[in-house]
Amino acid sequence: MSEPTTDLHPSQAAANDLEKGFKRDTQELIIEGAGCASCVTKIEGAIKQVPGVTGAEMNFAQRTVSVSGDADRKALVKAIEKAGYNAKPIAAGSDNDAMEEKEKAEWAYYKRLMREMTIALLLGVPLMIYSIVGGEMTVTTNSERLVWLIVGLLTLGVMVFSGKHFYIGAWQSFKNHSANMDTLIALGTGTAWLYSMVVVFAPDIVPEMARHVYFEATAMIIGLIDLGLALELKARGRTSQAIKRLIGLQAKTARVVRDEKDVDIAIEQVLLNDIVRARPGEKIPVDGLVVEGHTAIDESMLTGEPMPIEKKEGDEVVAGTLNKTGSILFKATRVGKDTALAQIINMVKRAQNSKPPIGRLADVISGFFVPVVMIVAVVSALVWLNFGPDPAVAFAIVSATTVLIIACPCALGLATPMSVMVGVGKAAEAGVLIRNGEALQMASKITAMVLDKTGTITLGSPKVTDIVMNSADSEETVLQMVASLESGSEHPLALAIVESAQERGLQPGKVANFNAIAGHGVEADYEGKRLLFGNEKLMRERNIECESLVETAQELATQAKTPMYFAVDDQLAAIIAVADPIKEDSIAAIKRLQHNGIRVIMLTGDNRATAKAVAEKVGIAEYFAEVLPQDKTDKIVELQMQEEIVGMTGDGINDAPALAMANVGFAIGTGTDVAIESADITLMRGSLHGLADAIAVSRATLRNIKQNLFGAFIYNAAGVPVAAGVLYPFLGLLLSPVIAGAAMAFSSLTVVTNANRLRMFKAQEH
C-alpha cells in the first residue's frame, strides 16, 4: 500500500490523549479584587507556590483562574487571599451548574458595584455641578470650614462604603511589597481627600491661593470607576455566549432502561454500559453505540453539517446532538466529563484561558507600569512645586492625582483576553476547536498550507472502480485474494477493497506471514501462494514483469484513480483501480485559501499520475506524490527553511509526525474523538472550509487584539503626559482628576466593546 497506517488504533489514541489531557485534576476559582493585568502575574505566582500545583492560568477577562494539580482547595484560597485578593471555588458538579454559579456571583458583584456607584455619584455630581456653575470650592471663612468639614466627612463615608475595595486592595499590595491598580486609585483619591482636610482644619499652613478642596474629585473618581467596572462586567458577560451555547446543548436528564423499565435520571447518574432510550425530538444525553432502532441525528450543533445523519445498529451517537425521526436504544460508552461534548467544552474553556504570545507582552508591561507611574506622579508633583505658578501646592496635588488615576492599565490587561474569549468562542460555533492562544496567533500568520489527499481533499471512502486482468482467472478470484490480504489493514484503500468483495458476496480468508512494506504495499501467504499487492515501485523491486499493464495503469491514474498491482507467485495477476471522490466543497475551500494569499501544497503517498489528476481538479499547482509518511515531515521542514509559516492538515493519525512538526497542525475530525488533540486546531466537520474559517477567525482575532492594545497604549502614552501638565505652558490646560477617572473607565469599556465586535464576524465571507 502507498500510505501505511500506524499501529495505534484511533480509539487507543483517544484513550491515551484523554489520559494526558482531560483526566488531569483541574480546579476553577472565581477571583474578586483583580483590577489590572499586573494582578494576573501576582495571582498566578501565589498559586504556583502552593504544594501540589502543577500549573495555574488566570483569565483576566473572566476573573477566573484554572489550577491543575492536586492542591488543597483551602490552601489555594488562602494563598490568593494572602496575595491581596478574594477567591471563591466553583464547587459545582456540572458545567451548567458551574456557569450558573459564576453568573450568580457576577450578578451579585454587579449589583454591589451599582449601589456603590450610586452612593458616590449622589455626592459627587452635585459638588461637580456646584463647581461648574461658579461655586467657590475654597476655604476662607469659619462657616466655609464648617460646611466643607461636613462635606469631607460625607466624602469619607463614600470612600468607606463605595471605595473600600480599592483601599483594602492597595493595603494588601503594600504588605506584599507590590503595587496595582488599587494602589493608584487609593493614592490618587486619598491624596485629594487628605489635602482637602488639611485645608479645612489648618488653612493657615496652606498659601491662600491654594486653599481649594477636592472632595468632588474623590467622590466622582470612585463613582466613575465603580460604574466602569460594572459596565465592563456586564459587557464581559456577552463574551461567554459561545460557552453558554455549548453548555446549553447538554441534556439535563436521560431515560435509561433498568429492570426492564424506562427510568428518567439526572445526566450525572448515567453509568457506563447503561442502555439509554432516545425518542424523536430528544437530545442524546451521553455518547454511545446504537443497539436497537433506526433514526436520523441532527449533528449540526457540533459539526456545522446541516444534513441529519442516518444511524442504525452499531453506529455511534454523540451527546448534545438531536434525535430527529426514530426511537433508538443505545449503550452508553462515554459519560460525564468523558463525552465528546464535555471535552469540547473543556477544550474551548482552556483555549479561552490561554494567552497568545502577544498577550504576554501586555502582562509584562503592566507589571512594570504601576511603579513607573508612581514615580512619574512624584516627579510631576515636584516639578510643579518647584517651577509651577501659584498656587504651586494645589497644582502639584492635582497633577499627581490625575497622573495616578489616568494611568491605570485596566484597558491594557483586558485587551488580549477579551478578544481571545470571543475569537475562540466564534471558532467553536463554526465547528473549529482551537487548542490554545499560541495556535490562535500562529494560524493568522500561515503562509503555506500543506494538505494530505486521502480523507482531507477527498472523502476518504474510496471505491473499487476497475479490475484489469492479466494472468488471473476471474475478477472474483482476484478480489477475494486481495481482500484476504488487506482484511487486517485499516487503510481507506484497503477497506474499499474489502467492502467491494463483501458487496459481491466474497468473504476474506486467512493469510499467513503478513508483512507491510512501508510506503509500498503488503505481502502474505494465502492457500500456498505468495501474494504481493502494492505500487509499481514494489513490483520493480521484486523484479515482477508489469510492462504490459503500465500504460493502462497510467491511463487510470490520469482519471484520478489509484492503480495498484497484484502479483501471485511473482507473476502479475491484475491491476485494481480505486477512486476516492473529491469532496464537493474542496475546490471552493482551496480557492478561499489561495485568495487569502496562502500557498497551497498537496502531499500524498499516491502515485504521481493520480496525484496530478486530483491536484488539477482542485486547482493546486504544487503537489508531491509517492511521499512516505516519514518524508512528509521532511517536506514541512523544507518549507520552513524557505521561511514559510506552515500549516499541515491531515487525519491526525497517519500524519501525526507532520502535524507535530508544522507551525500549526489542523486535524480533520468528526468531533466524536477529541483525541485529535495531537493537532493544534481540530476541524469537527470534514470540510476544508473549516480550515479557511479557522484562519479567517484567527486573523480577525489578532487584528482585534492589536486594535485593543494600540488603543490602550495610546490612551496611557498620551494620557500620562497630559495629566502631568505638559500642555499647561502652551495651552494653559491641566487635566481634572475627575475627567481622568471618566477616561479610565471609558478606555476599559472601549476595549470590551471592540472585542465584542468580533461576535458579528462572519468567517465564511473571508
Image (cartoon, grey):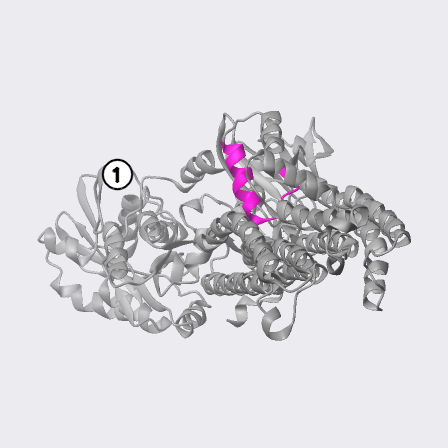
Q: Tell me the amino acid under the disc marked 1.
A: Val
Horizontally, is 625 left or right of 703 in the view? left
How packed mark 1 is, by other alpha carbons closer than 10 Å (few <14, some 14-19, many 20 or more), is many
* Residue 32 among magenta residues: yes
Horizontally, is 144 left or right of 676 in the view? right
Q: Is residue 317 visible in this depiction of the protein?
A: no
Q: Is residue 162 visible in this depiction of the protein?
A: yes
Horizontally, is 682 left or right of 224 in the view? left
Above or below for 486 versus 664: above
The residue lying furthest to the right in this view is 143
Residue 597 image point, x, y percent: 38, 72
Residue 368 image point, x, y percent: 49, 49
Residue 503 image point, x, y percent: 41, 52
- Decide which of 551, 205 is in the foreground and name it: 205
Regarding mark 1 in the picture, which secondary structure is present there? loop
Above or below for 373 versus 135: above
Residue 89 image point, x, y percent: 65, 33
Q: Which image quadrant for residue 411?
A: bottom right
* Residue 139 among magenta residues: no
The residue lying furthest to the left in this view is 543
**Residue where numbered disc 1 is placed:** 511
Start-end of magenta stretch: 29-48
